[in-house]
Amino acid sequence: MGKQLIKGNEAIVKGAILAGCRYFFGYPITPASEIAEAAAFYMPLVGGTFLQAESEVASINMLYGAASGGIRAMTASSSPGISLKQEGISYCAGSELPIVIVDIMRGGPGLGNIAPEQSDYNQMVKGGGHGNYKLIVLAPNSAQEMCDLTMLAFELADKYRNPAVILADGFIGQMMEPVEFPKAVEKIPEKEWALHADADDEKKLICSIQLDPDVLEKHNLKLQEKYKKIAAEVRFEEYYCDDADLVLIGFGVVSRVLLSVVDILREKGQRIGLLRPISLWPFPSFQIAQLAQKIKHFLVVELSNGQLVDDVKLAVNGKKPVLFYNRMGGIVPSPEEIIAHIEKTVKA
Amino acid sequence: MAKIIRKSDSFYPIYEHKSGAKDVTHYCPGCGHGVLHKLIAEALDDFQIRDRTILMSPVGCSVFAYYYFRVGNIQCSHGRAPAVATGIKRVFPESIVISYQGDGDLAAIGGNNIIQAANRGENITVFFVNNAIYGMTGGQMAPTTLVGQKTTTSPRGRSVANEGYPVAVSEMLATLKAPVYIERVALTDAKNTNKVRHAVRKALQIQIENKGFSLVEVLSACPSGWKMTPVQAKQWITDYMCKQFPLGVFRDTSAEIEPSPAVKNEFISHDLFKKLDIPDKPFRAVKSETPPVNYQNPRLKIAGFGGQGILLLGLGIAQAGMQMGYQVSWIPSYGPEMRGGTANCHVNLSNKRIGSPVVSQPSTLIAMNLPSLEKFECEVIPGGLIIYDSSLINRPPARKDVEVLGIPATKIADDLGNTRIANMVILGAYIARTSIIPRQVVVDTLPVFIKRKNLVPLNVKAVDKGIEYVSQ
């Protein structure tokens, strides 16, 4: 198929349409606005609906309504906007609605800035809304993956009746790279639980309210069972891990920088590798635990205050040292900066 | 003939709720919800629209409206029913979507959602139950609580100084252009109840005919919250609420608006690549000679003033590089930075997978103004290349360990009649010096990223001038 040099944010919309998504509800925010802009342009051309909502809160609730109709629908925003959506996300998780939410992360807390950070890790991976729920969280690190993982997000969301998230940073969203677009999805699964505006609807109810504690506990247990099944969908990439002493862990734009670090240090003969979680939930805990048996130490690099590193530490469970390096405020470290840190702190 | 009085078909035969008898509602004696439910259900029966009706249950006492209405049901978060209704109505334009809301839900937390749904003219019907109080949570003050009315959160009575005046929703929404029908009615005596019945039907009829947005505000008793008997409560509506919230039609354009058919969007799945502007020809890389080793796998930083076409220059290199079969990445400085001030972008061309797209140690720096040269000169790797616009930068780079190419790009562009193509002069100079991309590939890829097609020939000319300057 043809190749196109395209922004990650735009690749998301094209991927979504190829995945059969025809509904987009959003609100403008830098650095995610290109997603809404592309959706506004392309959705009407493919029989789709784009609606700019009055607020982030409205957009997630429009999505809640639209997804109740069993179609593929999405929204996109950036960190402060995602914070606003969290109540609605919790409702979607509780009502088991398969929606796709894109978060092009920026610097925080508060208004912060528009430079790339990864400080939404906790609010997406751990659940920023109320209640016992999990979101499927995929973390692309290229324009190609912005397309591919968006398509996967729709597939997984439908498969498990669960919201799925594309968690990318401002750089991955703004970067242009060649993308080869795959064929369009031909058939979207039928959803018996969904409303169809017909006589069968009287048997259906989209809701997250369960007044009876016993019933609500049962619902929660059912959700937890589902989450155990989703654990099988873990995705990650290993780069030179086989004989590594030191394994770097990072996602998104950081994983690209770490790739450069591995290339440079491998050339110097150092036994260094990279593990890149592609799904942040489910998290590749098992693979990290296995690596912990054979390597000497890990170095986690993130653009946040120590959010990813918590999950790595849980997986390593004290078996090996987990070192940590981070930047905040929208600064992406250079490979040289990380190499200098490794040379200073990692004892061979 | 005798009419058999029985429960509406649009109610479930059995009410599956948590406690109590399965044939009565959970509403308190004297509460208006039950009566309004009945009037709505009977209308759904008579219009024969139950099968395609989807009801939004709000947060409040009517959170359990879905216990009763035998339709498609969605329970919504507090205040968001109009947004949820918008979502499902857009999916099923032929459905009948009802947003059933109370005063705290609609007028307080969901105030913006109702205004915007009304303003969009969503073809939905809103039943707004105004009982001047938060009933379910135990009688707190609502936006519609009357001045002086005592509630659990206005224990000394609502004070204008502290809480302002009651919100008149119908009057407010009637100022918008899109709503078709807005009426305030009251569930008091038989005469008024009949008016409620009429308003409910009219509002639904408007939706059936696809005429647009309608809202019926229903003044309704909350004997428990008001701490009154049902009889006293009805009297209180007449004596007090109706004074603050006068009954009547506030907007009705239904006679002027032509009914229209509901058109469901067609799911278009043919020619998607064409519609999405994705090239559907298989990609073939252009073969060419290998450039000198010091120019291979370049990591470029390109910088200058906003408006000099810095980002486009980077894009041109990336686009042509991709056509050569290189892995490429292009990343801009973005946001407020790009609106005035300096602009820069980072471009990688590589034979292998590109790690960091951020160029911290460029092998090539293109500087189109002095601040950019001063800022980034030090970052260039030893043996690297600095190209600068010598018509705007009057001091050559100080570095002695790099290759320097000055070109009066802006002057050459001016001579061609357009200052803005200095970036393409530089592009020509860059490819001529490094041999990384043949001229023809650049010429072929220019139309991909130059939006105004009539400017392509001039841009080609500029590229050629750049090539010519370096080759002399």
Image (cartoon, coloured by chain):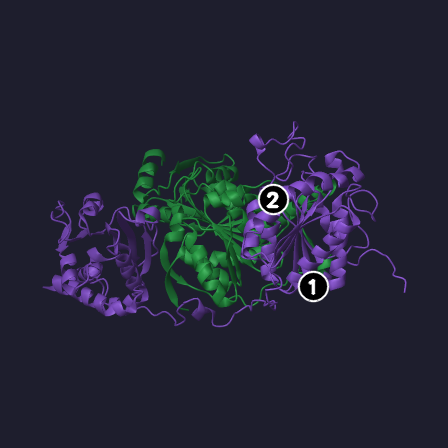
Chain colours: A green, B purple
Q: Is residue B292 visible?
A: no
Q: Position of residue B128 (x, y in %)?
A: 66, 48
Q: Nearer the viewer, residue A50 or A163?
A: A50
**Left or right for B313, reference B101:** left
Instruction: Using the image, determine if residue A64 lies above or below residue B133.
Output: below
Name the residue type under label 2: Ala
Q: Position of residue B225 (x, y in %)?
A: 72, 36
Name the residue type under label 1: Asp
**Left or right for B345, reference B150:** left
> Circle 2 sits on which residue?
B168
Looking at the image, which residue is at 49% across and 57% down? Answer: A150
Q: Position of residue A97 (x, y in %)?
A: 61, 53
In the displayed image of the protein, which residue is found farthest to the left? B472
Q: Quadrant of the N terminus of chain A?
A: bottom left
> Circle 1 sits on which residue?
A198
Please tell me whether mark 1 sits on a helix, a strand or a loop. Answer: loop
**Left or right for A279, reference A241:** right
Looking at the image, which residue is at 54% across and 56% down? Answer: B177
